[in-house]
Amino acid sequence: MKHLAILAGDGIGPEVIREGLKVLDAVAEISSFQYDAEEFDIGSERYLRSGELIRDEEWDALGKKDAIYFGAIGDPRVKPGILEKGILLTMRARFDQYINLRPVTSWHPYVPLKKHFDFDIHFLRENTEDFYIGAGGNLRPGEMRSRMKVVRGMYTLDLDLQAQADPEDEFAFEIGVLSRKGVERFAEYSFRYAAARGDDKVTLVDKANVCSQIYGMQREIFQEKAAEHGMGLDFMYVDAMAMAMIVRPQTFGTVAVPNLFGDILTDLGAQLQGGLGMGASGNINPSGVSMFEPIHGSAPDIAGQGKANPLAAVLAAKMMLDQLGEAEMVEVLQKAVRHSLDVGAVTADLGGKLNTVQVGDAIADYVRNSR
Ligand code: IPM
Ligand code: MG
């Protein structure tokens, strides 16, 4: 029996997670996979009601689950950053979910490229460091000192920035931080992942020609690990990578990308495979609790209308089953999604006529009939 935490969250989160759970119920009917689900009331409504994000007891309870199934957070009534940092980014850091796995698959015929390419790029986005480390601040007139503390599973970093400047000047800064330990585990995971997929190399994306301190160190460490694993390593600058994803997506396999660039490239990737409604992700800690989410966010403009595409949530559930060791059911869900696309059992964002619930029903039926 697997114990799942359900954080449906805001906007379309609850609608798509409901369909994902419907599909997991169908999986449980036809396989040995069994689960229970505990729902956590986390997100904007609670925050607006009580000013509370997540309590320590809830973090503890979440940490004891086998996996976390996450919908979306974000609400126009809440200042940007509060929910994102307080819930999502804190979760990734706190549970040390240091890999964000985001596959980009050519789900024909929804690929918006003129030429027909078959691709299956697996982005491994580093998920705890870089410009997401949370080390930023202001140097205001007369106050040219800023202290920051970064707490990670592997280290605590105290930063004390003292600046000399014209007393009238003002600055804001955000520091990108990579640690040797952090990059080593990222590289180790990337080469193992590539080998398991049958790739002979990893492509590392960065901007080492500009941010040469952090990405220079990252290159060195990836080179060491490539040699250790007897694997190939290609470097791509992030700007060139954005272009290459459009003109030759079929040439990429396992792609390792630091946090901020990974955020950007995987939205591009989601659109490449048919839209945000198809983008799923796994926030993975190989020896801890991992979290699985569609990457589309809360989409408040279409919430409650039955328009949301639940396939990203279904694909996130598929990744969760993979992490939980249910390889056979992963195949079934992959085929179920392929089938829905083939027969046009899709929502309006993909040109279909079905609503959220109907797509969920179609997938669940396919799963049941696959027995
Ligand atoms: C994502 C999102 C988050 C991120 C936001 C909501 C903080 O865009 O999962 O890609 O930037 O990582
Ligand atoms: Mg993003």
Image: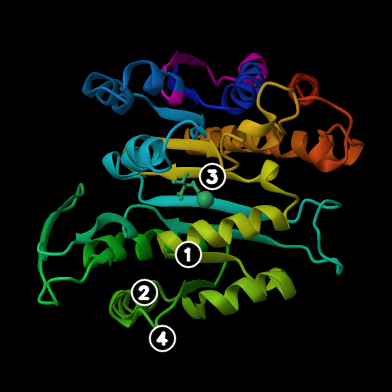
- From the viewer's perspective, is residue 262 above or below residue 213? above
Mark 1 residue element: helix
Q: Which numbered disc, 3 or 4, marks the residue that appears first in the sequence?
A: 4
Q: Amino acid at mark 2?
A: Phe
The answer to whether residue 178 shows anywhere in this view is no
Q: Which numbered disc, 2 or 3, marks the residue that appears first in the sequence?
A: 2
Q: Residues within 10 Å of mark 3 (few under 14, many from 20)?
A: many
Q: Amino acid at mark 1?
A: Phe
* Residue occupied by mark 1: 261
Disc nearest the viewer among 2 and 3: 3
Q: Amino acid at mark 4?
A: Asn
Q: Which residues are magenta?
A: 26-44
Q: Distance of mark 2 from mark 4, alpha carbons? A: 16 Å
* Residue occupied by mark 3: 281
Question: Residue 209, labelled with which disc?
Answer: 4
Find residue 364 and report its horizontal and vertical position in percent.
74, 21
- In this rendered view, identify the residue nearer to me: 335 or 300: 300
Q: Distance of mark 3 from mark 1, alpha carbons? A: 16 Å
Residue found at x 62% / y 28%:
12
